[in-house]
Amino acid sequence: DFSSFASEIAKITAERLSTQSRSSFFYTETENSFLNMPLFKELETKYPIKNRRKTPSFFPKSPLYLFDNPSFYKRFDLDTLFFIFYYCKGTVQQTYAAIRLKHYAWR
């Protein structure tokens, strides 16, 4: 007899669609999302260099000239642009990344 199954399915469906279960779902999801949120102060810590080594003369000492061209930043995806924006503070590269991010409507 499948009538008992049909009534159980109707009961479960009504329970799933209730607003209380939706609000508890969103509450649970929000709480879970905050569990793995990074502490940004820890991410920005700068470690002192203990053992400095002399850099070989053939190693570049300045950024590649391509990074001074604003059109070069059109090739980058959003993640790369955000990396440049946050880790190249006070440079021309940060400005070019900001211009490109604004083009993508990021503020």
Image: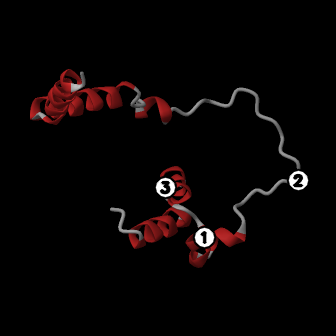
Q: How many marks?
A: 3
Q: Which residue does the image show at 76% across and 56% down from the upper left?
A: 61
Instruction: In the displayed orientation, state which residue is furthest to the left.
Output: 19
Spatial CA span between label 1 and label 3 = 13 Å
Residue at x 88% of width, y 48% of height: 56
Q: Is residue 40 above or below residue 84?
A: above
- Which numbered disc covers residue 106? none
Q: Counting residues from the N terminus, which is met first, the one under dot 2 or under dot 1?
A: 2
2 or 3: mark nearer the eye? 3
Q: Amino acid at mark 1?
A: Arg
Element at label 3: helix
Distance between mark 2 and mark 3 Cα atoms: 31 Å
At mark 1, the secondary structure is helix
Residue at which label 2 appears:
57
Q: Count residues near mark 1 (Cα–Cα under 10 Å), then give few for <14, some for 14-19, many for 20+.
A: few
* In this rendering, position of residue 22 left or right of residue 89: left
Q: Give yes or no for contact between labels 2 and 3 (Cβ–Cβ under 8 Å).
A: no
Q: Position of residue 83 (x, y in %)?
A: 53, 52
| Tag 1 residue | 75
Disc 3: which residue = 82
